[in-house]
Image (cartoon, rainbow, N blue to C red):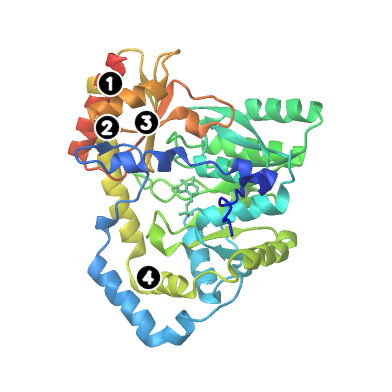
Amino acid sequence: MTISAAPSHTHRMARRAAGFQPSPVRAVFDISMRPGMISLAGGNPYLPVLPIGEIAAMVGDVVERRGLEALQYGSGAGTEELQALICQVMELEGISSASQNIQITAGSQMALELVTKLFCDPGDVVIAEGPTYVGALGVFEGFQAEVAHVTMDAEGVDPDGLQDVISRLKAAGKTIKFFYTTPNFNNPSGISLSVERRQRVVDICRAEGVLIVEDNPYGLLSFDGTLRPAMHTLDPENVFYLGSFSKIFAPGLRVGWIVAPEDVRGRLQIAAEATTICPSVLSQLVVEQYINSFDWRGQIAAYAAVYAERCQATLNALAAHMPGGTQWTTPTGGFFTWVTLPEGTDTGRVLAAAIDAGVVFVPGSAFYADGGGQNQLRIAFSYAPAGQLEEGVKRLAAAIRSI
Ligand code: PMP
């Protein structure tokens, strides 16, 4: 009997599988692990700020007291208690939502997947900031949605630009499903949408029949404590709000949520159940315990203080070392700053030189669906200590000069 070669399956895959491409952030992960390499690439929260001993005791306590519940299947929407506690967290940004409006998810990444699955047919258009979160682009591409970008300036998306994009797409006969936005400390640019513009953006989308998906994992990590009202507060029926404990507590728990209008919630829960049956009950009970018994607001302030210091170190190093003609954003919260090199510079080529010089970053084109961002790059200042950030920026500047 002859044994035939192992069959190939890729040609049998659904068309949408072509959209599942490796993330450029993950692609540099292995490189960032090399000894001596400084990573400005991955936007990981700096977990050493957490008192791990106390968290360990908290997790042990949850299992001891509520183990049979924690290790069992639970409600598809999430635990009622965590839904209520999430309402308290959201109050910090002006949201007053009933707890039954909340669908708990495995991080806001799953929430993004769910809204896209519910709303986007192949060929539908999602409007997104340019640049936007690479993980959202991956989801949109996976569902064969087209992405149209709106440009940003220091105050966030330009409302007139948004109106133009909507009008142009409609004139071309396209179906726009939603505007995806990270209004606070945008990943990758660090830019926030000004309070004045929020109302205009909400009004335009409402008038044009375009939903808004407001993704807000970084909003509470404001360096000076200033919090902007969520866009959801301006039009709760047309703005889906996505929140997450990944950056204000810990991403390994995979707990996020989505607040959606009433007529969507039922279907959203069924779609969520089809994916995971229920959110992890153990993780939810740990978050409950954390919010109930720990100074979680103080912890957010402690995280923000570390990021503020690292951001300042990064900005100082950029000012000291970058070649003339380079620009960067000045974030007031979050994890990232966005660097623009002179027109014509290819940050893909800079990356190759930077790796030789001992530093990695994510090139700007990763954050656009249309080939934009060629002369731009993202610096994550959340994880590396200030001294490494300074040295990393110095190496980056040398790499830029060398190409
Ligand atoms: N949205 C944005 C803008 C992000 O930066 C991230 C994580 N980097 C996510 C969503 C997903 O986060 P999580 O699933 O951990 O909540």
Alpha-carbon neighbours of circle 4 within 10 Å: few (<14), some, or many (≥20)?
A: some
Name the residue that disc number 3 marks. Answer: 330
Image quadrant where one finds the C terminus: top left
What residue type is disc 1 on? Ala
User: Looking at this view, is 272 or 358 the one in front?
Assistant: 358
Name the residue that disc number 4 marks. Answer: 290
Q: Earlier in the sequence, mark 4 or mark 3?
A: 4
Quarter of the figure with residue 15: top right
Q: Are marks 1 and 2 in contact (CB under 8 Å)?
A: yes
Q: Image height check: is 127 above or below 288?
A: above
In the visual, does 187 lie left or right of 300? right
Q: Are marks 4 and 1 in contact (CB under 8 Å)?
A: no
What residue type is disc 4 on? Tyr
Name the residue that disc number 1 marks. Answer: 399
- Residue 12 in picture, x, y percent from top left: 67, 48
Q: Image height check: is 62 above or below 335?
A: below
Q: Furthest-front residue in view?
A: 1
The answer to whether residue 101 is visible is no
- Residue 279 in picture, x, y percent from top left: 54, 69
What residue type is disc 3 on? Thr
Which residue is depicted at the point 48% across and 57% down? Answer: 244
- Residue 245 in picture, x, y percent from top left: 44, 59
Which residue is depicted at the point 32% across and 79% down? Answer: 60
